[in-house]
Amino acid sequence: MASCRYQVLLLILCTSTLVYAERLHEQIYSSIEGGAACFRRLNGTHQAGCSSADNGAVGVVHMIKEINDAQWLVQNASAGPYMAVVSTAQFYDVIEIFMQQPANVAGILLYDNATDSPTAFSQESRCPNEYSSAPGNTCSSTVAGGIVWNTKGTGLLRRNIPFPIFYLPQSKSDEIDKIQVCYEKFNLDKSNQKGNPLCSLQLNSFMFAAVNSEVCLRRSASSALLTPTKVCDPLGDNNVYYSLFPRTEETKSSKSVTLVTARIDTASLFDGVSPGAASSVVGMVTLLTAATTLSQLIPAKDAKLHEQNVLWTLFNGEAFDYIGSQRVAYDISKGVWPAAAPLSPADIRLHVEIGQIGGALSNSNDSSWPFHAFVPYSNIIPEINEFLDMMTSNAKPYNTPVITPEFTTNLPPSSLHSFRRILKNVTESGELPEVLLVDHSNTFSNLFYQSALDEYGKIRFNYKNLTISDTGVFVSTDALLANGTLKEGDPQVKIARLATALARTLYQTVTGTAYSGNITASAHLVDEMLYCFLQSQACRLIMAADYASSSGGESPPAVPAPLYVGVAAWAATAPVFAAHLLALLTGAQLPANRTVCDTLAEPGYSYYWLRGWNHSGVCIQTTMNMSAAVSPAFAITDYDLSSGMYSSWTESVWQAMSARVFVSAGGGGAGAAAGAGVAATLLAAALTYWLHRHADRIFATPAASIVNDDAASGILRTVNC
Amino acid sequence: MTLAEFFSCSLLAFGAPLVMFSLTVANDPVRIIIMIAAAFGWLLSFLLSSLVWYAVVPLRSYLAFGMVFAVIFQEGFRYGMYLLLRKTEEGLKEISENHNIGSNKLEMAYVSGLGFGTMSGAFALVNVLADSVGPGTLGLHSGTEYFFVTSAAMTLCMILLNTFWSVIFFSGFDEKNYLKVGWVVLSHFFVSGLSLLNSRELYAATILPSYIVLLITAYVAFRSAGGSTAKLVQSFSSRS
């Protein structure tokens, strides 16, 4: 370290590159970059998630290698509080120890280790969205044991965590190495930590909101008079829907509708890390691909020939008590959804939900993909039986999927719960029949449900990076299988076949005859779509489906768009991508230039000027539209947020999230400074006092004063200025 | 341990100068003016040396280069301070209510030295003190937690040295005894040069010789001011 005085010279004019010329601050602290913090959400009655103290949580680093380390930390450690550094593989085993005895725990730094990956990892409840379930639900997260959907779920997403948690992905393993080096240098002597310099961590993720949604919304509103401070925002975003044929107020009554739904969003405990591969993306991509295929099977101009319509809907915010589907069911009950031509429950012939279907993709390498169709009726509903029979027969050529019906009202988490609660009269009686397709029976096959580790590798996805022609033609599945690019067991092929079966089944429903052509869903399209949602939003599809007007801007970052629903005040990008993909892939391309495109207005359609496959701009005519996915709780005036009727989740506001590692002082330096300081000051005081008091005796009297007394000095003295 | 460190280090570095100020300077407005003027003089010298450091781009990364110029400019301004005080002494004495102010010619030297030293100490330590608030201390890359206390001790040493240097320096010029002036300049270079060793974490090698130089300088200053050891001892015995 540079000298105490000449360092300053460089501190003030700090441009030098020498090691000891760095800011002292940089010598003391090393920030941990790329971490994602756990944050706070609130519902009508509770707060959930984490918050640090206002100025961050500080603790001594302790690397948790086994359960004993965690027990030592909460019971025997003396230099506390401690910051536990835990790998994802250890997390499930130790988190309950920390949650039970949090007194000595300052926080947790969770890291993902390439060599030691967990077999299961889910911070979602054992029974996701348990308190928004329809009657008949038998899953209970509070009862120990029993059959639950999410067996390895810790429930942290729904619990109040008394300390901050940060997550470091695999790509940031060098940060963990940094902490490891510091830990080994200072903290290894476990019995002799107190009073010595120790490697420490500071995690800063202070959350402004507290207590519950009602309190934090009141605080957000009431302080507006003095200083406008917002402490929480309702969760919400947009639902996306698209109908095969245009629906207008005049023509809607002539056609009954098959509602096909899936969800867009997923969640995780950590900010910005919600990959959701098996949890939601496979279902969404299946729906988008099937919708694309059906639009190829039935041209939109044939609308007048058919008595049926198909309404494809993507719900958003489903991870947090079914925000999107609750809103849609609520709006249907009020007769206001979709806005242009509202549906009544009687118009809906059948509701098919594509639920969580990605989990089983991780298990098998062959073409098998077993499905379970949850049918919440004890009596026979002809529409459902017919649908399942058609699915089975359409899937026959590929042996995928094989669907096993499950006749139970204990439904897995899905939008069916919302419809069965809010539209109870029609759904329970079977007037509005509902069926749910998932790939599991009693418990999830996806062991990473709504977690930071639910990544593309978990569904064995391997991007093939094939080029798309200028006209938007995708290579067919059969061609890709024939040239060996893809194999039968690849998720792209499986999803394409499921989408084909679904599209042909819906073709049969709409036209009344089985499909005899040879159009199938393309595994190439599935490949691109999975890549867009799981690996990089700077992908071919999203570039083509973006607004042409934004072509001047920079391309989106090469990371997946977050699939967390986010707050209603901010539109997330993932639903916009899904919506534009639907428009581009299913809509009709009109030979119109941009100005003409902007003036078009045929009822039932909307018009988008998108970039197109060759990025020159295309005018798309589509029936796609979006509707608000904000819980009815925030739409109804004077709604009692604690009633539990509708989703009441809000997200806290925060200012900054940061983590840094440093060495905390053992106290030796401060002790030495205090001792020396007191001694030096007392000595100086005594000496000065003595010399000052006896100055006339100790110091020789000056030889002669330079100044002589004269008249002028007398004058000045009287002036006394 | 962090706030404790901040206050302990502040006490170590500034406790003694504060006591000296309150016992000898604070009761006389003219002395306060002189002290502030000297502190301002130190600031000017520092501004000039930083300008030189900034202008000579190729040598910027060499700490010793900046140090040499800083010492030269400080001693230059100490001489400027001497000239200024000798020129204004009469006037100051006139406006002062304390007519004994000029009774010892080196009184002004002591006061201006204290001002010089306090300002240099403040500049040396304030950045360090700001980081001592914590929660961290040195040690992650290099250094130990004793960095702060050694910095504070060095600062105290420099403040006291500057005070005594001024006394010797003024007396040297009054008596035309250039040996004293030489001692001031050389010991300043010596102590500053020693502090370069801090970058190698040789704290003891810096502090011990610096305090030895401080003791010698203090004694020389005491003698220059007309003090005698015999009378000092006498003052104790007559009291007891």
Image (cartoon, coloured by chain):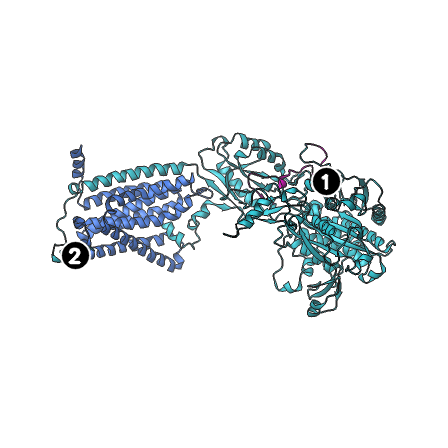
Mark 2 burial class by Cα count in 10 Å: few <14, some 14-19, many 20+: some
Q: Is residue A39 visible?
A: no
The C terminus of chain A: image quadrant:
bottom left
Q: Colour of chain B?
A: blue
The answer to which quarter of the image holds residue A251 is: bottom right
Q: Find out whether residue A158 is within the magenta segment.
A: yes
**A472 relative to A185 in the view: left or right:** right
Q: Which residue is mark 2?
A: A716
Image location of residue A43, percent across then percent down: 62, 43
Q: Which residues are magenta?
A: A144-169
* Mark with earlier residue (2, 1): 1
Q: Find out whether residue A684 is within the magenta segment.
A: no
Q: Colour of chain A?
A: cyan
Q: Label 2 marks which chain's residue?
A: A
**A292 relative to B55 in the view: left or right:** right
Q: Which residue is mark 1?
A: A444
Image location of residue A680, percent across then percent down: 30, 39
Marker disc for residue A26: none
Q: CA distance from mark 2 to mark 1?
A: 98 Å
Q: Is residue A84 visible?
A: yes
